[in-house]
Amino acid sequence: MPQPPHTKPAPLARRPAETVLTPGWRFLVGWTTAWAAVGVAVAAGISFGAGVELGPVLRLSLLFSQVVGYSAYVSARLVFPLLARLPFALRLVLDSLILLSGTLFGSLIALLIEPLYLLAQFRIGLLIFAGNTVLAGLVALSLGTYDRMRRQIEASYRVLRERDALEHELGVARDVQRELLPHQAPDIPELELAGICRQAIAVGGDYYDYLPLGDGRLGLVIADVSGKGVPAALLMASLQASVRSLFPTAVDPGTLNANLNNALFRASSAARYATAFLASFDPQTGRLSYSNAGHLPPILVQREDTVRCDEGGVPIGLFEGSTYDTGTRLLVPGDLLALFTDGVTEAPAPDGDEFGSTRLADLLRAHRDQPLEEIIQTVLDALVQWSGPIDAHDDVTIVLARVP
């Protein structure tokens, strides 16, 4: 069988070379072309209106338009931003002088290129210079305004991105802090419990807790860390960890407050402290042992009287070595104990008057027999009605305990 004749493969067609322009070169070509068009337009207008020869006018217009065009660009993009902080009048004078210097430089070059024509057609030369100079001024003003608006938009966009990132981080911190608070009260037949914490901002320094102590007793904690925001939240988390680790082995609430005081004093600055109320309840005897470290005294609503639990000492974290007393109360069926932070009693009315602990005690006594969650909601509604449209100035934390 004959073999097919050997044929050379057809050469691959060469692709035409592609000219790749960087953004800088693309701008340079575009800007030069635009100002060349300006020069042509100026030359055509002068030649048509004055009836002169187009050639010299076109050469002068092209040359001058390039000089003043780049003068306008340099002024608007590089020089004007450097003068942005100067007073407006001084900045206007300097901007005008910068544009004028570009015009004078272009005039000098044009004079060197076409001296005889300019001497013979002085008015035509002035028209060329004036037309391009006015255009350069308008372009410089437009570019400067555009750049200023662009920088403002970019700055606003950066601020919005930073704000979004901060809000996201605060949202994560808020979720983490909510996980640190009790999800539900322990089920103890001898004591009804309910609590709530509402931060004034994303995170705060209020803290409450229920702690089973292992011997049948229950620990109750409420605390308010100085300050607001993330620093207070971090200190609150540290305080919570210390309370949970030390409470089960503490001899009594007063000793626990003393240990917490020394730990907080060593771990934080002098400006950081916390008020705290720590109590342990023995369901077998109804005995409540407590120590109040500078916190607002909890209100104990009894059948015939309303008393305050104020025995203890100074806020924790202020002075190393502080000692704290331990007080006791005997809770009987029907007694209602209310723990709260200053976001409740110091809630301001529009005229500046505070809600106060007396008003809170009266409210608790009036609704003492309702379910605890309803009592808390009643207090929250009263705070909203009291403060009106004013936003909450501080975290609001309420913990209720009642012997059934």
Image: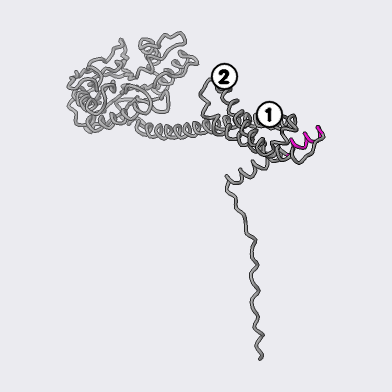
Find the distance from the CA under tag 1 to the CA under tag 2: 20 Å
Q: Position of residue 307 (x, y in %)?
A: 29, 12
Q: Position of residue 138 (x, y in %)?
A: 66, 29
* Residue for point 58% across, 30% down: 149
Judging by the rendered image, the residue that carries numbered circle 2 is 89
312 in the magenta segment:
no
Magenta region: 40-50
Determine the secondary structure under disc 1. helix
- Which of the pair 356/109 is nearer the observer? 109
Q: Position of residue 165 (x, y in %)?
A: 46, 35
48 in the magenta segment:
yes
What secondary structure is the magenta-colored segment mainly?
A: helix
Q: Which mark is residue 399?
A: none
Q: Quadrant of residue 65?
A: top right
Q: Quadrant of residue 113?
A: top right
For the N terminus, the image quarter is bottom right
Mark 1: amino acid: Val
Task: Give the crowd class for mark 1: few <14, some 14-19, many >=20 residues within 10 Å.
Answer: some
- Which of the pair 349/402 is nearer the observer? 349
Q: Is residue 332 visible?
A: yes
